[in-house]
Amino acid sequence: MKTIPQPGKLLILCLLSFFVITCSNNDDDVSPETENEISTTDGNPNATPSLPNIVRLAGSVDMLSTLLDAIDTADAGIAETLLSEGAFTVFAPSNDAFTDLFDQLEDFDTLADFDEAEEKQLLALILQYHVIADNEAFSSNLTDGTVLTTLQTEELNIIVDGSVFVQDKTDELAEVIGADNDASNGVVHIVDKIVLPQAALDVLFPKPSLVELVMDTEELSLLEEAVIKANLVDALNGEGPFTVFAPTNAAIEELFTLLGDTFTSFDDFDNFLELQILEQILLYHVVPANLNLSDLTPGPVNTLLENEMLEIVVDGNTFVLGDASDINANIITPDQEASNGVVHLIDKILIPQEIQDFLNTINPDDPSSGLPTLKELVENSEELEFLEAALKLTGLLETLGEDGPFTVFAPTSETISFLFALIGGSIGSIEDFDLDSEIDILRKVLSYHVVPGTFTSADLTPGNLTTLLPNDGFEVADLMGELVLVDGLHLPVHLLDTDIPAKNGIIHTINRVMVPETVRDAILTETEQNFLDHIGHFVESDQFVYAFMLVRDSFEDVLEGDGFTLFLPNNSAFLELFEDLEGVESLEDFDTIDELYLLGEILLYHCVQNSTILSSSLFNDKELKTVQGETLKVKVGNGVFILDKTDIPAKITSPDIEVLNGVIHTIDKVLPPGRVLHQISS
């Protein structure tokens, strides 16, 4: 351990040496009478003895030596304060009190560990909390209930119960073990504990966050699973403050019973509707305020679930919680404090009105009873907000409220950029569909996503499905063991959440908007169609085609020019790119103007315009000027490689594929141009 430097303390004592009379330092059992004998006559035996000041008084007592060391370590300004004239009351912690504190701390074993500026300030703050200015309070003035404002500004409370105790912000009292030690500028009471203000407690003993508190509580392990499953960890780690009424494991088991035999754990919440129900239930347990048990008053309180309130109900000498059910919840363990709020353990899941209405309509003999219609599902799902707006605009939303049944392959809101890019022009939001021709295209696209009849994921087998768009269906295909949908672009569409039940059908969510052939033929030029038909024959090219469709306007001049050379990255190359780009997990994440511009820059960096370059013309160190404006370089040796602005070359895996008036070389890496390298995190 580090040794504690002493010059500050020695300086203080030297300054006092002109009038100090040496006193015995063996008074470990301090009493008021002993301390009051410490006095000075300034060397004149006939003079009236005078009292020492507070610093000298402390320096004369062995059991306060650590306190002097602490004053020296923390801030000489404290010593100056206690040397000054005035009327101070000091609750002076004994050496043992400091030892007890160090035993409780992880990062501080001795005063020497307070060696950083912020740590010294923390120590000074603690010492200031032991000092009362402008108040010379002897024990006779310390009555039960006395409140003292400290030099640190927080308060201390006095409790008199046989002995005199000092109450700080902890649960443990400090006992006065040596009272009324008179000094020239105040009085010192020796205490057996370091008293700590809240500001110091927050640093030395930081409270866990609400999420950490839940994770550390064995009875709340299922609640922890639920919070993670509903993706609410970040919300509950927010600044708050929040009050969480936390259902115990036993209470959550009751939720599974309420929801039926198909729910035995949170793994069974596997589609967006079920996850939305779980999220709503959990948000209903959180109040946006810090409410300890003593703060509760009868009446309704807001929760994080919009427009849903909890009822605080008086029950004898305590409170219970009323929800939309007939059974109140009891608070069984209150006031578990966290850094951003408080947790009360309760014995029941709290059910909001909307969920209770759903539970009330469930008929075990009729699995579809109580379920919303497809129309209601779409209207109540945040994940399908875009689909709802588009269905309203085209007049198709009411169709999903009819008897049906229908199977809806629902593109989520994250996929809208693909549709906007597909149509092009000035389309940037659903509100921009203001021409009859544009709305007609949108209506065809949406009708293509609805299949008459009910098809669960188990019912889907390779073959063709008829849609509500006349004479235009899509294919269900087996792609390396995965069932995918193949649309008019001849590209695979992947299923996300499947088998979401409705009263009049079923919903499966998909990873992008599907394009019927009739729409493809209407919006793509003949050159673009031919280009995509050629590209579509490559099994590993659908990521590039998707990217091309997002920025196809950028390629118009390239495809219509006097030839082109394209280095086409395979799907694996795009997946590696997503790992390197911050905030990008798939092409669906390119959904802003800036991000689409970035994607266009990347793709155009793979293309050489007005030049059809076969592999036989690619020699070592050859430079290629790209449409994007920057150059690529060729490296030959154990294959042909393309060098970008990184240190990782791209290998040509399939050369010389002739397409239209150009040539394609497939490569195993996406080539980032220099202007976008700063976007890459690794």
Image: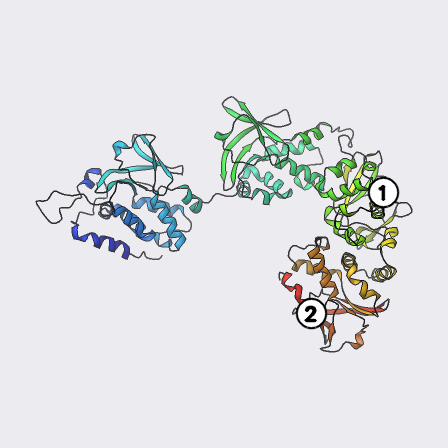
Using the numbered discs, state the Cα–Cα distance from disc 2 to disc 1 in whole angstroms.
Answer: 46 Å
Left or right of 137, for residue 620 = right
Q: Residue at x 69, y 57 (%)?
A: 595
Give the structural element (helix, strand or loop) at label 2: loop
Residue 304: image location, x then y, percent: 60, 36
Whether 75 is drawn above or below 258: the answer is below
Question: Can residue 49 be seen in the rendering of this structure?
Answer: yes
Q: Residue type at mark 2?
A: Asp
Q: Who is closer to the viewer here, 18 or 349?
A: 18
Q: Residue at x 20, y 45 (%)?
A: 52
Whether 640 is drawn above or below 134: the answer is below
Q: How many marks?
A: 2
Q: Residue type at mark 1?
A: Val
Left or right of 293, for residue 188 = left
The residue under label 1 is 451
Give the structural element (helix, strand or loop) at label 1: strand
Left or right of 8, for residue 113 = right
Q: Which one is earlier in the sequence, the residue at label 2 or at label 1?
A: 1
Left or right of 516, for residue 547 = left
Please tell me how crowded label 2 is: few (under 14), some (14-19), or many (20+) other residues with Cα within 10 Å: many
